[in-house]
């Protein structure tokens, strides 16, 4: 079993990927993250882990969290849902994305958003960000969560006539960005955004020369996002960095 592996083997990413598909997720987390093994073994299921805020916080705060998300969609869904207090019934991120109730709960949880901000590059992350930016209510929920968060700090506010000037603020760090996509002189000037070079949206606009992203927020960005423009767009951003 995984719990009998040496630390060197347990910390190997390929071993972890294989183990996630073979063993109960509780044992994988036990060995890989070394979380209070005695109590964890007494938990009936991973839903129990997600419903215990101590475990959710430990998992999200682990430097190895990103590796688990990289190799297995299921724990990301459970951690997201558990951090938002809505763990039951969601076996993968697609199920969460397709549930307005689950998504709203996730986006209202700063713990869940803290975990998401630590993921670097995965199809799961892309699908989540695309879904968020297609839904005004989800954008608003994240904006509200960030502005009252105690886990994130507002590290930057600014407007960019050259929208690519905002790229540096999303090149590193565990960040969530509130964006106000707008124009310099005409509503035909629009903002486009990609995540790790894959298009998330094109053609967003609506506000004249925004100086911040926390007012009239109409898009959400995370680490790895880059911006381009159609004609002469303008982009306001407010960056929130995980403490």
Image (tube, rainbow, N blue to C red):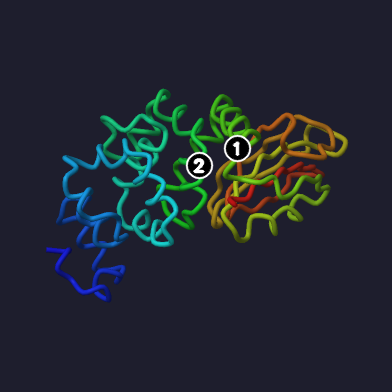
Q: Secondary structure at mark 1?
A: loop
Across and down, in percent, residue 241 comes to 63, 50
Residue 197 figure quarter: bottom right
Choose the circle earlier in sequence order: 1 or 2.
2
Q: CA distance from mark 1 to mark 2?
A: 10 Å
Which residue is tagged 1?
A: 149
Across and down, in percent, residue 206 comes to 75, 29
- Which mark is drawn over residue 179? none
Q: Nearer the viewer, residue 219 or 144?
A: 144
Q: Is residue 241 above or below residue 49?
A: below
- Which mark is drawn over residue 113? 2
Q: Residue at x 16, y 40 (%)?
A: 44
Q: Which quadrant would the N terminus be assigned to in this image?
A: bottom left
Q: Residue at x 76, y 41 (%)?
A: 236
Across and down, in percent, residue 200 comes to 55, 44
Residue that lies at the very extreme toward the right in this rendered image = 185
Q: Secondary structure at mark 2?
A: helix
Residue 220 figure quarter: top right
Determine whether label 1 and label 2 are within 8 Å by CB.
yes
Q: Is disc 1 surrounded by few (<14), some (14 to 19) or many (20+) residues within 10 Å?
A: some
Q: Residue at x 81, y 48 (%)?
A: 160
Residue that lies at the very extreme toward the left in this rendered image = 1
Q: Residue at x 40, y 38 (%)?
A: 83
């Amino acid at each position: 079993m995984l719990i009998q592996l040496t630390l060197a083997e347990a910390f190997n990413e390929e071993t972890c990927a294989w183990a996630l598909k073979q063993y109960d997720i509780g044992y994988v987390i036990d060995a890989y993250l070394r979380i209070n093994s005695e109590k964890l073994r007494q938990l009936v299921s991973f839903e129990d882990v997600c419903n215990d805020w101590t475990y959710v916080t430990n998992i999200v705060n682990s430097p190895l969290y990103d590796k688990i998300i990289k190799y297995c969609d299921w724990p990301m869904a459970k951690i997201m849902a558990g951090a938002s207090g809505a763990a039951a019934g969601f076996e993968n991120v697609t199920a969460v994305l397709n549930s307005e109730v689950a998504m709203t709960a996730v986006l209202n949880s700063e713990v869940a958003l803290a975990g998401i901000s630590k993921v670097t590059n995965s199809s799961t992350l892309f699908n989540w960000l695309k879904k968020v930016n297609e839904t005004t209510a989800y954008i608003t929920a994240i904006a509200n969560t960030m502005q009252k968060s105690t886990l994130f700090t507002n590290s930057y506010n600014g407007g960019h006539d050259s929208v690519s000037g905002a790229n540096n603020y999303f090149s590193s760090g565990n960040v969530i960005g509130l964006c106000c996509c707008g124009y310099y002189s005409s509503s035909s000037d629009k903002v486009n955004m990609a995540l790790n070079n894959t298009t998330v949206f094109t053609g967003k606009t609506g506000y004249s020369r925004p100086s911040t992203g926390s007012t009239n927020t109409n898009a959400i960005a995370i680490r790895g996002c880059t911006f381009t423009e159609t004609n002469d767009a303008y982009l306001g951003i407010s960056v929130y960095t995980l403490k």
